[in-house]
Amino acid sequence: GEDVEQSLFLSVREGDSSVINCTYTDSSSTYLYWYKQEPGAGLQLLTYIFSNMDMKQDQRLTVLLNKKDKHLSLRIADTQTGDSAIYFCAENDPGTYKYIFGTGTRLKVLA
Amino acid sequence: NAGVTQTPKFQVLKTGQSMTLQCAQDMNHEYMSWYRQDPGMGLRLIHYSVGAGITDQGEVPNGYNVSRSTTEDFPLRLLSAAPSQTSVYFCASSYSRQSQETQYFGPGTRLLVL
């Protein structure tokens, strides 16, 4: 089946770390993605990870992948007010051209 | 490069009216797609195209038509608008179908059907 789930809301204090979680059901997905959507804007690709990797780090962003549990997470270190946005995880349906998106997690950063 | 552009930004329609949402990209991308975004449901794929002259259905194609006569343009047509089509519509493109290729999203069209 194709289903990507995320919690809807997350609130953190400025300077703390944020962890946004995602579960997916298609174990054959080859790439998993994190997108950021700021208010009134389209989606912006933040990072992606190969399915044969466990972790990927890119500046303040760390992606962890637990393929056995089909669990993906995005950690934002030293969260800033500019990080307030909706974050979507997505997977690519292998063999097709379809990207399957999660429901999105709204991150609110408190000053 | 302008990237992915969408027009209009906002539109209000009455039930039964038809309209076309425009999408264009100037990056010579093969792959283009249309999504709708509804609260609590993420993005759902409506239609997609892997090149000029080739289109296919996504997850929620009913009530929408597309065509791809050029590489640059991928319009989405609502034949007879219904209130259930009130949503935010995003167009996206990428260079190819390869999974690692970045999808570029347009700024969206907000549609209200009364």
Image (cartoon, grey):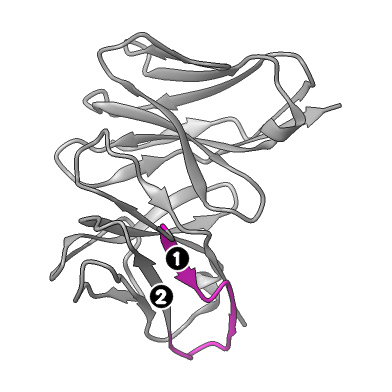
Look at the numbered disc 2 and give the secondary structure of its residue.
Answer: strand
Q: Are marks 1 and 2 on the same chain?
A: yes
Relative to A19, does residue A24 appear above or below in the rendering? below
Horizontal and vertical percent position of residue A65: 39, 14
Magenta highlight on residue B6: yes
Q: Which mark is residue B5?
A: 1
In the image: residue A40, left or right of residue A62? right
Residue placed most toward the observer, B30 or A52: B30
| Residue at left offset 55%, top offset 56% | B38
Q: Which residue is mark 2?
A: B22
| Residue at left offset 36%, top offset 68% | B24
In the image: residue B99, left or right of residue A103? left
Residue found farthest to the front: B1
Magenta highlight on residue B12: yes
Start-end of magenta stretch: B3-19
Do the numbered discs 1 and 2 sit on residues whose CB atoms are within 8 Å?
A: yes
Residue placed most toward the observer, A9 or B76: B76
Relative to A76, does residue A86 appear above or below in the rendering? below
| Amino acid marked by disc 2 | Gln
Q: Nearer the viewer, mark 1 or mark 2?
A: 1
| Amino acid marked by disc 1 | Thr
Residue placed most toward the observer, B80 or B109: B109
> Dot 2 falls on which chain?
B
